[in-house]
Amino acid sequence: MADMTGRTLGKYRLIERLGRGGMAEVYRAYQPRLERDVAVKVMLGYLAEDEKFVGRFEREAKAVAALHHPHIVQIYDSDVEDDVYYMVMEYIGGETLKARLKRLNAERKRMSLDDVARIFRALCDALDYAHAQGCIHRDIKPANVMFDGERLVLTDFGIASIVGGTRYTASGAMVGTPAYMSPEQGQGDPGDVRSDVYSLGIILYEMVTGRLPYDADTPLAIVLKHLNEPLPPPSQVRADVPLTVERVILKALAKSPDDRYQSAGALAEALEAAVESAEVPAEALPPLREPRVAAAPPAPVAEPAPPRRQMLWALVGVAALAVVALAVAALLILPDRGGEAEPTVSPTKAASSTDAVAHYEAGVVAFHEEGDYETALREFTQAIEADPEFAEAYYQRGIVYAEDDQPIAAEADLSQAIALQPDLVEAYYERGYLYLYDLDRAEDALADYTAAIELNSEFVEAYVDRARCYLWYGDDHEQALADLDHALELDPDLAEAWGLRGEVYFWREEYDLARPGLTRAVELDPEDTWAWAMLGSSHYWMGEYEEAIASYDEALQLEPGELDLYYHRAFASFEMGNLDAVLEDLNKVLLLEPEHSGAYYGRGRLHAAAGRYEEAIADFTEVMKDKEQEYEWPYFPEDSPYLDRALAYQALGRTEEALADLDMLIEEAPYWHLPYYYRGLIYKELGQTEAASADFRALWENAPDEEWQRKAEGELEALQ
């Protein structure tokens, strides 16, 4: 549809086009008689030819015009002129909630919980009112929430339908926005009040954490995550989310409608109570980074193994043995000061009895020299029984528990050691290590590493691990770099710090700055598989595919059984056009992990591109056996094995099987444009003009951009 700016529709002069949606364009217009600006929603001319769309448009205008609420945009009028259908509504000139959240993130701020609760009260009041009138919104998202000064206004009830009335769009396509769509909408169910509650829950999650709970490369993948993936708890994204608020979000986003709040008002009340009882610092916090979703290629391999405790623990053990020796000497040679005076021990408060010292020394030898956990635990326990205030015995027993994969017991002992001896710097470090790597308590880890650094400003390992906290959980890259720079001042040849410094820049997507640190890391420690893999991925993103392959080769020399390295090397080989090498690496992945869906998917795409359609069909079928996998293969625009298998079937002339896969896709994801396109082409080839026309119309409605709309229009014209 051509831009209608400057045209007059009825009583309204169109001044500027504000936007375009799936079924209408919106203009700012002027109504001279009342001397006011209005918004005019104009039905796209192409759709005006369809009686079903026209009827739906007219019903929506009447339904929404009947809604009168201070937080719902007011509909003034609806009419038709020269086959142009339009409705007129209140013009809101302020920013959207989407724009406000984007601005706050850019400023590294967040909205206060009080503001969140205030906004939600207005939103929920509006929806409670609309629901009582039988009107479900079905497309609640920040872009449809606007601010008129201090007044909040919910807009675009244009996709809503009256409960009990007709629930369709053209071609039966589902209404809604995948990122905010309820699981039932994703399954093709129009949903009820509780579907709107779910969408509110997504907005609440985004306002509190700074990001959406689910993200993916395609709308279909996002909907599947809403259906199948557990919700990432908000506190894993932002450690400071109050438990009371998190509970409200989790309930609002329950997969089953029966488990959610049963009304918008109930959600608002629960949120207000949660905020009132929560204690959250008011200062602005930087937004956490997005999770590391695999692209091309994903972050290499897995996270690096935590730094080995054993070296630090061995040093502590040696120091402790020296303390024990001094303590024993003191017990043996210090003169009796008379009466029942307590024996004098060293200033480190190592022990107050020879039995405690003896058991402690035996425990240190058993653990640090012999690796005998059972004996070490027994000896340290006997040392504690002999002297319940023996801090270093608690500390050493905590280390053994940690190494023996008993993190809860380890935390208890390390905490007791700190309580008895608050200056025991190593205990803070080791407890921080537990919090970071074993107990998923990053905020507590940060506090312990900071305490260790305050006690010992030259504690290199504490700087490095605190940098990990800032990088992995706080998204504070500047602070992470500051800690790593400090560590490198203390130890310029610390490979771990150089590697982590490169990782910081990698996640900032500053790959040219990532490479020097990673290069220095592998120079200092040529056996660091993680650093080689990160270096390979940095080269990849810089377009240096030959260097990427060389780095992955080095990593594979060290870890020949690491399937992800083969997978990532395949990416680089693809970019160099070496498809034989790609196929070889994908085959190695499948040899190591016979159910690796990504490798099957990538290999299937290669077979299809080479015309080996039978082999491609076999691989795509393997992918479908594992419903939990994602089929990321970054060289192709879509990630549906059903679509790819349908195209392979059609290439072999197996039309019925191709149509069966496309029918399934359209039933499961009626908003995805590509299945309509390819099914329409098949119907066109079969001479089934009516069916092809319906699919190309559906393609137009669900088109992601104007280019696809033009493609649909071209196909429709060709059918005439």
Image (cartoon, rainbow, N blue to C red):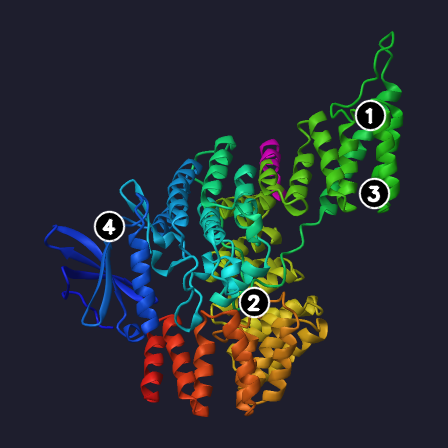
Outermost left residue:
33
Q: Quadrant of the C terminus?
A: bottom left
Give the spatial CA distance, label 1 vs label 4: 78 Å
Instruction: Name which residue type carries label 3.
Output: Phe
Instruction: Name which residue type carries label 4.
Output: Gly
Q: Which mark is residue 536?
A: 2
Which tag is nearer the camera, tag 1 or tag 4?
Answer: 4
Q: Earlier in the sequence, mark 2 or mark 1?
A: 1
Q: Earlier in the sequence, mark 2 or mark 3?
A: 3
User: Is 470 displayed left or right of 107 in the figure?
Assistant: right
Q: Mark 3: few, some, or many residues within 10 Å (few <14, many ≥20)?
A: many
Front position in the image: 324 or 708: 708
Instruction: Name which residue type carries label 1.
Output: Ala
Instruction: Name which residue type carries label 2.
Output: Gly
Query: What is the magenta segment's predominant secondary structure?
Result: helix
Front position in the image: 576 or 159: 159
Region in magenta: 448-461
Which tag is nearer the camera, tag 2 or tag 1?
Answer: 2
- Residue where numbered disc 1 is placed: 327
Outermost top residue:
339
- Residue where numbered disc 3 is placed: 367
Which tag is nearer the camera, tag 3 or tag 1?
Answer: 3
Name which quarter of the figure residue 450 lies in: top right
Q: Which mark is residue 93?
A: 4
Q: Are marks 4 and 3 in contact (CB under 8 Å)?
A: no
Residue 92's spot in the image, x, y percent? Answer: 25, 50
Q: Are marks 1 and 4 in contact (CB under 8 Å)?
A: no
Q: Earlier in the sequence, mark 3 or mark 1?
A: 1
Element marked by disc 1: helix
Element marked by disc 2: helix
